[in-house]
Amino acid sequence: MSNTLQYQLNPHEQEIVGGLTVRHSEMVATLLEWSLINSGSRNSEGLDNMRAAMRRYFDQLPAKVDDVPLAVGEYVSSKGVKEAVEYMPALRVRVRSEAPIQLVLTGHYDTVFPKDSHFQKPVNMDADTVNGPGVADMKGGILVMANALMALEKYEHAKNIGYTVLLSPDEEIGSPGSAPLLAELGRKCDVGLTYEPALADGSMAGARKGSGNFALIIKGLAAHAGREHHLGRNAIAAMAEFVVGLDALNGKREGVTFNIAKIDGGGAPNIVPELAIGRFNVRMLATEDVAWITSQIDTLIAKINSKDGITAELTGGFSRPPKPMAPANAMVFDWVKSAGALLGQNIRWAPSGGVCEGNNLWASGCPNVDTLGVRGGEIHSDREFIKLSSLVERTQLSAVILMKLASGEFDAKAAKTLAQQGR
């Protein structure tokens, strides 16, 4: 680990950091406007509106800003049919692609709140707290990112850094369309910075679990529940057996969890149900867990398929590998801690069971830190909140990180080399 005392802020850097305080009112006003835009992952119109608002904001940078089409995905409908899904475009911001140091900064402009959610408007809770959709996760983080980049552009060594910003519309549903873009950027960039929210006290996520999302399609045979019940093959009963078996796997391997999240199927009570779809999520600590998880699920499915007249088909897969606190990621976290110390911020972190785009970047060999966004909490609920003072506070933190990367005091190439050697 580096000694945080070796770093200092020179007068020019101090001027840039201090100048960010005047941005507070504008950042708050913009955040409130953005929170009013419902940009749920399936709300195409809202995502279009949010992307347009972000484009106008990022146009303040000397950048090429464009929309990037995403890969077509697949979704199992409630009728058990695998359907193609087209996602809204990502917004890409590119500056100095020829510079010797290349960074990737990522974020998402979708939220977990659908178009018909009751949670639609920000509300002031106190002088420093706003409750609202997306204020922390992660429209506030996008504002921090943009303003930190604006600060970088005032820096004398900014020419040493090129960067690509990718703002995706599908992170909250696992990044199925943007994953190839994240992988490409991770391979070519030296360091990644992602703007998921920190906790309310500023603590950040360190090591992250991996994740997989699956849908099991079970088909049986419909029949009259009274006169010909014996001819039917109950898909929901078979799904219930699978679900019980899946849930029983919890606690069998350290750090591995199985969560059955939704079951579709069935109909009128006088019909033996011929279809059931079970959607579930798996989390794991290490890549080595995947083989065990796969084996356990395969065993459960084989048991279902052994039943007369019942078939089971698994769809989906592991979308985000684990992100350990490997030496290269530890180096980047050390920079963040050092930058925080220069600002009087005590940066702490702890392992997280959550996943994000930082997992994707690490999987492609890019060391990164992924909770550089605002301080907040209770995300993914109608109690989501942001601490408004963190807008400038976290912008200052990112500005210092970016300036030290540009000056070479934080050695981006060394982190990338360490990631390639130690993965």
Image: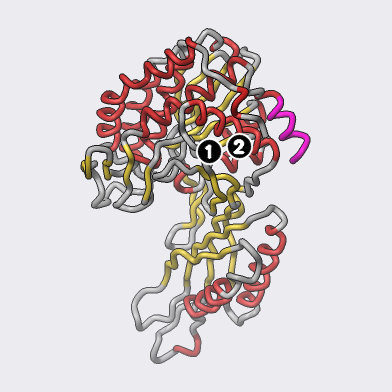
The residue at which mark 2 appears reads as 361
Mark 2: give few (<14), some (14-19) or many (20+) Cα within 10 Å: many
Q: Is residue 180 above or below residue 249?
A: above
The residue at which mark 1 appears reads as 370
- SS type, badge 1: loop
Q: Is residue 68 left or right of residue 114?
A: right
**In the image, which is nearer the foreground, mark 1 or mark 2?**
1
Instruction: Please provide percent x and percent y for residue 15.
Output: 42, 13
Magenta-tinted stretch:
414-423
Residue 245 falls in image quadrant = bottom right
Q: Is residue 6 left or right of residue 389?
A: right
Mark 1 or mark 2: name the one nearer the start of the chain: 2
Query: Is 142 included in the stretch rendered in magenta?
Result: no
Q: Residue at x 34, y 26 (%)?
A: 52
Whether residue 176 can be seen here: no
The amino acid type found where label 2 is placed reads Leu
Q: Are marks 1 and 2 in contact (CB under 8 Å)?
A: yes
Q: Is residue 91 above or below residue 19?
A: below
Instruction: Please provide percent x and percent y for residue 367.
Output: 64, 34
Instruction: Please provide percent x and percent y for residue 207.
Output: 60, 47
Instruction: Please provide percent x and percent y for residue 78.
Output: 42, 61
- SS type, badge 2: helix
Numbered circle sitting on residue 256? none
Q: Residue furthest right?
A: 421
Name the main secondary structure of what is drawn in magenta. helix
Query: Is 418 included in the stretch rendered in magenta?
Result: yes
Q: Residue at x 48, y 22 (%)?
A: 399
